[in-house]
Image: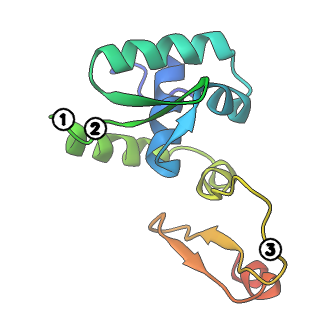
Amino acid sequence: MFVLKGILRAESQEKILIYLLLREKGYGKAIAEFYGSSQNAVQKQLIRMEEDGVVVSRAIGKLQEYELNPRYPFLAPLTALIKKAIAAYPQDLITKLAMTRNRPRKAEKPVVYADEKSLKVSRSKTTEQAKSKL
């Protein structure tokens, strides 16, 4: 799904921006795997967007971790535009993106689900309570 077709250069740019907006940071490979896209296409767009100042990266070992550039002059309007584009995406994709867990969860730790209306994260005490909210 490519909502911002007339504004962005490529579909992978839209996917990257949505991923980084909802997850705050990510690796090229993780973004490509999440969407089932070509890692090469995602990596090229990340490099291009970094050259344009939209995203910034930092090296963690051999990996590059990317995030939206907080000093980008048009970050606020870009964020507003991406949030409107997110509304056109299927809810299950948005929920999967909002589930930001990189490591296994402890048994008693609450599960985090995205609130459907505002994309804010709500915490629940047990898995059963969280599932009943969906």
Q: In which quadrant of the rendered image does the C terminus lie?
A: bottom right
Q: Seen in the image, is 105 located left or right of residue 133?
A: right
Q: In which quarter of the image is residue 81?
A: top left
Reply above or below: 17 against 5.
Answer: below
The residue under label 3 is: 106
Q: Left or right: where does residue 44 sit relative to residue 52?
A: right
- Identify the mark nearer the N-term, 3 or 1: 1
Relative side of 58 to 131, left or right: left
| Amino acid type, label 3 | Lys
Mark in front: 3 vs 2: 3
* Secondary structure beneath label 1: loop
Report the residue at 67% width, 16% height from top: 39
Q: Is residue 71 visible?
A: yes
3 or 1: mark nearer the eye: 3
Who is closer to the viewer here, 45 or 88?
45
Which quadrant would residue 91 be assigned to in this image? bottom right
Q: What element carries label 2?
A: helix
Q: Which residue is at 49% across, 68% downward?
A: 117
